[in-house]
């Protein structure tokens, strides 16, 4: 007999096996009948178009034997594919739309691939804004609003603080509610946070960067009195923190409810790939943020105002706020289609029937409580839900391992561009672009590859944890590259004396005989690179007396600098505005191993997430992700940027001086910065490796006989549903 094909094409598979569902006959003496998907004949009662039998007598599988879904308002049984009819199991409307407005043209997006597309757009925007734009502009914000690194670290951590506050509520109630509505409103709030984050630019007044002519030459320094020069701009950090807080609130549903919504609506085998694509978009987002944000930083923050300083000048502040306006508007647009999706997608019940549990087995059997259909629907079940997760050691240690990884990711993503800026003597925009080039292939590729490997090798939960362990050990070994660092560019009065001898760390001596009569001010920091390849604090500190413009690149060039001696002619040398270019030979090696660290760190992210979803009961997945994110953010995301910011502050050689008040850092000690980074990286990687080992050792999979069909059910490349063969010859398929 000809076999009807499933023409939906959803998730790229079709049923090719014979499914034999045997059931007791309602009439005595009658042998139970079977249902053959190839013939489409009756089995145990009325045949259903999705191949699920129904019986006149109630059975435990009745909830899965109901008709599947409806896709239009008022019509119970719209044809979505040839030979397949979806209707709702409880009269629920599963059409895509807003209220009663469910046009047929929208239903083409009412698939798992449509949901994946819009969730990828949302995660891309979240990653681009929170982990891209903010990390790119952090140096510019510090300079514009007189912030220190630990204060900017607190701004970055506000995102995680908000997430921790909201996660329990969102994951518990949202997990049992209408997930797309929670997701849509979350993206909307995230867009509002982007607009709030850009607000200080419009209310703080124009940025006044003193021109090169005003701060430049010897004897020409003019300074505002301290009463006028001092500002309270650092108080704007509270508005930045509010914007980040809204970002955290809005993104909370995205990585908890969004992941479980995808997982519930696709095959078990395809779930890691879908989640990997989703997270890859979240990784490419920051990379795009670094690249686009770096481009915006080449535009002066006060658009339309003429200024005679270049982006290489340390007093330059780029248009950091443009990206947040665009991200806010885009978030509003993306939230609209997400709000239109139904509680579950048409046809999703088939995957619930196919799913094989890999939940960790507790000795007292209390894990079976979570399989109760009524469990988790009221606040009364919240303490029991938490207790069940706390009694799951595999889940706990996966959470702790994720926290150690999150600490490094949060710290390095926030201050990674600053690390490159210091090591390679780059401008802020160049450093952001460099870091973007690292994150795109390493972070995005590692995230997708992790999900692909889980799907390719059909890994079960224990195998997935072992893959995470391998990735963590590999990135641990690559961390030793931070033993290597690029030397600081020589800077007169900061790293060495004007005569060329070394200066002890922290001992500044910016005054010498060559500039003693110039009246140079320490408040005016405008580094120049002398023709002797030595950096000077400002043209005045280099003793320069004349200024002109380089016609080739438009940079200011200073002449007759008494502190710079030409090697060939016994007369004062020249200096060009900006830092000296680093010729560090270790740059390729550093960049390569940083690539390896990022690759293997992100390679373990999707496998670790998949292991978390599989080691808990199905009804606890959203809540488990919420609890995991609380642990990850509390122990990793929040302290990470603050800890890294404090460590980087310790490696500062030259602080901004604002009339006796300490501002942001101008120059860092490269070897100290590398040493602190190496120490933090090794400690967290060793601890993370230990947690993965313990999680693997303590995992107790369900016994083979408790799994419906066979333990290989979820590893079948074509179908997760195993064929149930009857022992009676009369029940064999015909």
Image (cartoon, helix red, strand yellow):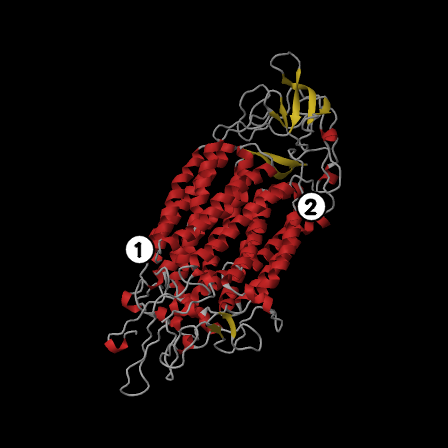
Q: Is residue 689 left or right of residue 659?
A: left
Residue sitting at x 36%, y 50%: 467
Hey, which quadrant is residue 74 in on the image?
Answer: bottom right
Choose between 103 and 556: the one closer to the eye.
103
Report the residue that reaches farthest toward the bottom: 28
Question: First in sequence: mark 1 or mark 2?
Answer: 2
Q: Is residue 593 left or right of residue 649?
A: left
**Residue 329 in view of the camera:** yes
Please say if 278 is above or below 174: above
Measure how far apart labels 1 and 2 are at the Cα level: 55 Å
**Disc 2 element:** loop
Q: Give coordinates of residue 108: x percent, y percent.
A: 55, 64
Choose between 340 and 225: the one closer to the eye.
340
Image quarter where the C terminus lies is bottom left
Question: Do the residues bearing badges 1 and 2 touch, measured as CB atoms within 8 Å?
Answer: no
- Mark 2 crowd level (few <14, some 14–19, many ≥20, 10 Å Cα): few
Residue sitting at x 33%, y 74%: 21
**Residue 643 in view of the camera:** no
Residue corresponding to mark 1: 697
Hey, which quadrant is residue 122 in on the image?
Answer: bottom right
- Which of the labelled discs sits on residue 232, or is there none? 2
Q: Give coordinates of residue 366: x percent, y percent.
A: 35, 70
Please say if 212 is above or below 532: below
Q: Give coordinates of residue 633: x percent, y percent.
A: 49, 54
Please say if 621 is above or below 524: below
Residue sitting at x 53%, y 38%: 419
Choose between 458 and 3: the one closer to the eye.
3
Image quarter where the N terminus lies is bottom left
């Amino acid at each position: 007999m000809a076999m009807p094909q499933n023409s939906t094409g959803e998730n790229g598979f079709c049923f090719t096996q014979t499914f034999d569902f045997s059931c007791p006959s309602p009439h005595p003496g009658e042998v139970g009948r079977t249902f053959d998907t190839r013939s489409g004949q009756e089995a145990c009662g009325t045949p259903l178009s999705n191949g699920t039998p129904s019986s006149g007598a109630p059975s435990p599988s009745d909830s899965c034997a109901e008709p599947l879904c409806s896709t239009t308002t008022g019509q119970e049984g719209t044809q979505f594919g040839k030979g397949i009819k979806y209707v709702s199991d409880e009269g629920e409307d599963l059409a895509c739309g807003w209220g009663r407005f469910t046009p047929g043209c929208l239903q083409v997006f009412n698939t798992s691939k449509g949901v994946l597309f819009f969730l990828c757009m949302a995660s891309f925007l979240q990653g681009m804004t929170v982990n891209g734009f903010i990390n790119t502009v952090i140096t510019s914000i510090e300079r514009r609003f007189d912030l220190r690194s630990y204060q900017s670290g607190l701004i970055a951590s506000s995102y995680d603080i908000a997430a921790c506050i909201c996660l329990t509520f969102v994951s518990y109630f949202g997990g049992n509610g209408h997930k797309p509505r929670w997701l849509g409103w979350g993206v909307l709030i995230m867009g509002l946070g982007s607009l709030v984050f850009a607000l200080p630019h419009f209310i703080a007044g124009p940025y006044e960067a003193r021109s090169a002519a005003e701060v430049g030459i010897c004897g020409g320094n003019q300074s505002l009195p301290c009463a006028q020069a001092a500002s309270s701009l650092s108080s704007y950090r509270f508005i930045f923190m509010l914007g980040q807080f809204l970002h955290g609130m809005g993104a909370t549903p995205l990585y908890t409810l969004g992941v479980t919504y995808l997982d519930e609506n696709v095959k078990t085998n395809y779930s890691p790939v879908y989640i990997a694509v989703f997270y890859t978009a979240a990784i490419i987002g920051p990379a795009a943020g670094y690249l686009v944000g770096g481009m915006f930083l080449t535009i002066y923050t006060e658009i339309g105002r003429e200024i005679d300083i270049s982006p290489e000048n340390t007093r330059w502040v780029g248009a950091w706020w443009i990206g947040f306006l665009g991200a806010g508007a885009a978030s509003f647009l993306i939230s609209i289609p997400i709000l239109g999706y139904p509680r579950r997608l048409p046809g999703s019940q088939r995957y619930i029937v196919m799913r094989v549990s890999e939940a960790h087995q507790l000795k007292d059997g209390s894990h079976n409580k979570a399989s109760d259909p009524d469990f988790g629907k009221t606040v009364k079940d919240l303490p029991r839900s938490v207790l069940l997760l706390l009694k799951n050691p595999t889940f706990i240690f996966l959470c702790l391992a994720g926290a150690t990884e999150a600490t490094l990711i949060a710290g390095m993503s926030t201050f990674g561009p600053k690390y490159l800026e210091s090591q390679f003597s780059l401008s802020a925009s160049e450093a952001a672009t460099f870091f973007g080039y690292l994150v795109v292939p390493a972070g995005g590729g590692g995230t997708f590859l992790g999900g692909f490997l889980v799907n390719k090798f059909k890994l079960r939960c224990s195998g997935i944890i072992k893959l995470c362990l391998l990735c963590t050990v590999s990135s641990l070994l690559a961390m030793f590259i931070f033993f290597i660092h690029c030397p600081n560019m020589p800077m007169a009065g900061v790293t060495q004396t004007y005569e060329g001898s070394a200066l002890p760390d922290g001992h500044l001596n910016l005054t010498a005989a060559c500039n003693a009569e110039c009246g140079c001010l320490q408040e005016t920091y405008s580094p120049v690179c002398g023709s002797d390849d030595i950096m000077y604090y400002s043209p005045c500190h280099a003793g320069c007396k004349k200024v002109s413009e380089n016609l080739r690149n438009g940079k200011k060039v200073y002449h007759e600098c008494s502190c710079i001696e030409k090697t060939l002619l016994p007369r004062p040398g020249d200096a060009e505005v900006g830092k000296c270019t680093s010729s560090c030979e270790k740059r390729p090696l550093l960049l390569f191993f940083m690539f390896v660290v990022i690759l293997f760190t992100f390679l373990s992210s999707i496998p670790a997430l998949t292991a978390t979803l599989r080691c808990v009961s199905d009804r606890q997945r959203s809540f488990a992700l919420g609890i995991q994110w609380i642990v990850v953010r509390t122990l990793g995301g929040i302290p990470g940027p603050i800890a890294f910011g404090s460590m980087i502050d310790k490696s500062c050689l030259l602080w901004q001086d604002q009339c006796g008040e300490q501002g942001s850092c101008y120059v860092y000690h490269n070897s100290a910065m590398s040493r602190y980074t190496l120490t933090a990286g090794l400690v967290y990687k060793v601890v993370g490796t230990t947690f993965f080992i313990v999680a693997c050792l303590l995992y107790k999979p369900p016994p083979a006989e408790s799994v419906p069909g066979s333990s290989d059910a979820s590893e079948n490349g074509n179908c997760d549903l195993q064929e149930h063969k009857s022992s009676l010859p009369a029940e064999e398929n015909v």
